[in-house]
């Protein structure tokens, strides 16, 4: 009912102004409505990665600095922790990155071992297959290299990376 009375008084005032019985309010009579400034968003605290992913993050940072020895140690720690926790996704990622670090140190056999572990853990990991193919090529195991690259392309047929790897392989083996 209170709302109805307010509406009625407002309507009555508007009708009186329209009939020119009352003068419209002057700017001095009206109170400006203060606009409330929106509160700035509260800063969001970053969520630290789970314990088995911390060495993975540290290994990636070392890789960015081309410190492959440190990266290999950090990825090895991530592998150990992820094996203990049963986190196969982190384990596969750590093997993949450690394999790349081994390639950075010109150690293709260790890289191939890691890439093979990636595809054992995740058989549909296209990048794992492509990297394995590259390592096999470095080891001069050409038939395995071509097979692994083609398998990676079959898993991700829309990926330019696979076709780039195949083109690079074919250009070297005309």
Image: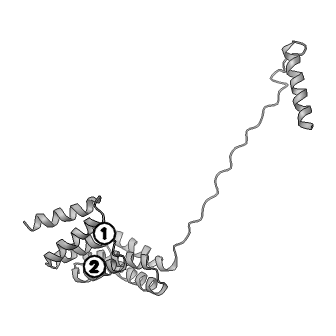
* Label 2 crowd bin: few (<14), some (14–19), many (20+), radius 10 Å: many
Name the residue at 60% across, 61% down: 44
Task: Name the residue at the top extreme.
Answer: 20
Which mark sits nearer the N-terminus, 1 or 2?
Answer: 2
Q: CA distance from mark 1 to mark 2?
A: 16 Å
Q: Which quadrant, please, contains the C terminus?
A: bottom left
Taking depth in this image into account, of 131 and 65 the one nearest to the observer is 131
According to the image, label 2 marks what residue? 102
At which x and y percent is residue 53? 47, 76
Residue picked out by circle 1 = 127
Relative to residue 139, is residue 16 drawn left or right?
right
Is residue 157 shown left or right of residue 50? left
Give the x, y percent position of residue 33. Answer: 78, 34
The foreground one among 65 and 142 is 142
At x 30%, y 69%, the residue is 127
Figure check: 16 above or below 155: above
- Is 83 rendered above or below residue 5? below
Q: Quadrant of residue 145?
A: bottom left
């Amino acid at each position: 009912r209170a709302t109805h009375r307010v509406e009625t008084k407002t309507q009555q005032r508007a009708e009186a102004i329209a009939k020119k019985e009352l003068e419209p309010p002057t700017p001095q009579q009206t109170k400006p409505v203060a606009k409330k400034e929106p509160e700035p968003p509260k800063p969001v605290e970053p969520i630290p990665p789970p314990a088995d992913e911390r060495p993975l993050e540290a290994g990636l940072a070392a890789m960015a600095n081309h410190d492959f020895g440190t990266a290999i140690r950090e990825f090895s720690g991530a592998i150990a922790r992820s094996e203990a926790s049963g986190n196969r996704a982190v384990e596969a990622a750590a093997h993949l990155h450690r394999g790349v670090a081994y390639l950075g140190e010109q150690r293709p056999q260790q890289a191939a071992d890691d890439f093979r572990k990636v595809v054992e853990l995740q058989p549909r990991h296209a990048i794992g297959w492509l990297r394995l193919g590259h390592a096999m090529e470095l080891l001069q195991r050409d038939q395995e290299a071509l097979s692994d690259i083609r398998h990676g392309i079959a898993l991700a047929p829309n990926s330019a990376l696979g076709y780039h790897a195949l083109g690079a392989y074919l250009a070297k083996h005309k």
